[in-house]
Image (tube, helix red, strand yellow):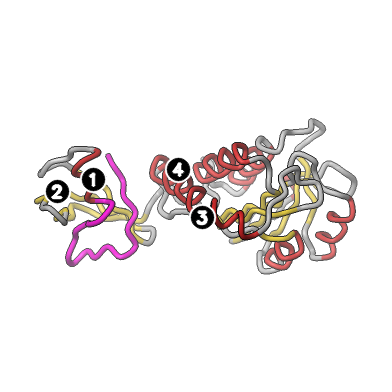
């Protein structure tokens, strides 16, 4: 069943316009009596199309329920910026796995060097990738792709999370099995192709970010966040 996100959706006057109208009427060629789902602020509304006019899709709500695909935890992924195609893959797959927000981070060993202004030009495309992945996977929200951060500003943001973690294969890390499983908010900081400089890990630990590891194998930068997210979701009971 097609799914559409619209935070301004009103159950009292259920209708869709704009890009939703074009997608429903022209791309999907849907007709009255066909069903679709509208997701608004984490609630799924199963609807039947009553009428499609030149500027509006009028709906009838059949049922509503909280989106069952949303995890019970909030996870912010702080991803050191990799090459563009890898970052797009990370966005898509991490949204499917339940991430709440993706924060791109510029670190010392990033192969791609980009300033904030150049990244902002790419942000609409990245957000569209997140939206498409959220629709495909039945999410209850569209995760946000944030503007580019420095590692220092990312560390400051991680202070506000209950369990901030950085994936690091060096000394001082703990296994994911030792991570607190009952928190509400988590942060995962993942390196780029070159990993982290030891001084960066020191700075993060000074901000109370806990190093964790996934075993002895070294994972690619596009594999590590997806593996870490999967393990965290399973560890917290959100991948059952």
Q: Which residue corresponds to the image point at 62% horizontal and 56% vertical from the top-left? A: 103
Q: Which residue corresponds to the image point at 67% horizontal and 64% vertical from the top-left? A: 162
Q: Nearer the viewer, mark 1 or mark 3?
A: 1
Q: Which residue corresponds to the image point at 78% horizontal and 42% vertical from the top-left? A: 213
The residue lying toward the viewer, choosing from 98 and 148, is 148
| Cα–Cα span, label 1 and label 4 | 17 Å
Residue 166 in picture, x, y percent from top left? 75, 51
| Cα–Cα span, label 2 and label 3 | 31 Å
Circle 1 sits in a helix, a strand or a loop, which is it?
strand
Decide whether residue 208 is among the magenta residues. Answer: no
Mark 1: give few (<14), some (14-19) or many (20+) Cα within 10 Å. some
Circle 3 sits in a helix, a strand or a loop, which is it?
loop
Decide whether residue 9 is among the magenta residues. Answer: yes
Marked residue nearer the N-terminal end (1 or 3): 1
Marked residue nearer the N-terminal end (2 or 1): 1
Circle 4 sits in a helix, a strand or a loop, which is it?
helix
- The residue carrying mark 1 is 36
- The residue carrying mark 3 is 72
| Cα–Cα span, label 3 and label 4 | 19 Å
- The residue carrying mark 4 is 133
Q: Nearer the viewer, mark 3 or mark 4?
A: 4
Residue 78 in picture, x, y percent from top left? 66, 53
Residue 86 in picture, x, y percent from top left? 62, 37
Q: Which mark, residue 49?
A: 2
Whether residues under marks 2 and 1 lie with C-beta atoms below 8 angstroms apart, the answer is yes
Marked residue nearer the N-terminal end (2 or 3): 2
Please state if 201 lies on the left or on the right of 116 as rendered: right
| Cα–Cα span, label 2 and label 4 | 24 Å
| Cα–Cα span, label 1 and label 3 | 25 Å
Mark 4: give few (<14), some (14-19) or many (20+) Cα within 10 Å. many
Marked residue nearer the N-terminal end (1 or 4): 1
The number of discs equals: 4
């Amino acid at each position: 069943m097609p799914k559409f996100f619209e935070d301004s959706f009103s159950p009292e006057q259920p209708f869709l316009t704009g890009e939703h109208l074009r997608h429903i009427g022209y791309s999907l060629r849907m007709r009255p009596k066909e069903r679709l789902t509208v997701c608004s602020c984490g609630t799924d509304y199963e609807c039947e199309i009553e009428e499609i006019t030149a500027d509006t899709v009028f709906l009838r709500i059949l049922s509503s329920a909280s989106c069952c695909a949303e995890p019970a935890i909030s996870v912010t992924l702080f991803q050191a910026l990799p090459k563009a195609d890898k970052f797009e893959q990370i966005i898509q797959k991490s949204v499917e796995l339940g991430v709440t927000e993706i924060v791109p981070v510029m670190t010392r060993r990033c192969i791609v060097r980009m300033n904030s202004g150049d990244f902002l030009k790419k942000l609409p495309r990245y957000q569209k990738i997140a939206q498409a992945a959220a629709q495909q996977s039945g999410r209850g929200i569209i995760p946000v792709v944030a503007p580019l951060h420095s590692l220092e500003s990312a560390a400051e943001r991680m202070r506000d999370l209950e369990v901030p973690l950085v994936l690091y294969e060096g000394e001082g890390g703990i296994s994911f099995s030792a991570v607190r499983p009952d928190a509400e908010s988590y942060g995962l900081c993942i390196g780029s192709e070159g990993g982290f400089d030891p001084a960066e890990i020191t700075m993060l630990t000074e901000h109370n970010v806990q190093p964790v590891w996934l075993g002895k194998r070294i994972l690619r930068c596009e594999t590590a966040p997806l593996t870490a997210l999967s393990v965290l979701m399973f560890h917290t009971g959100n991948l059952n």
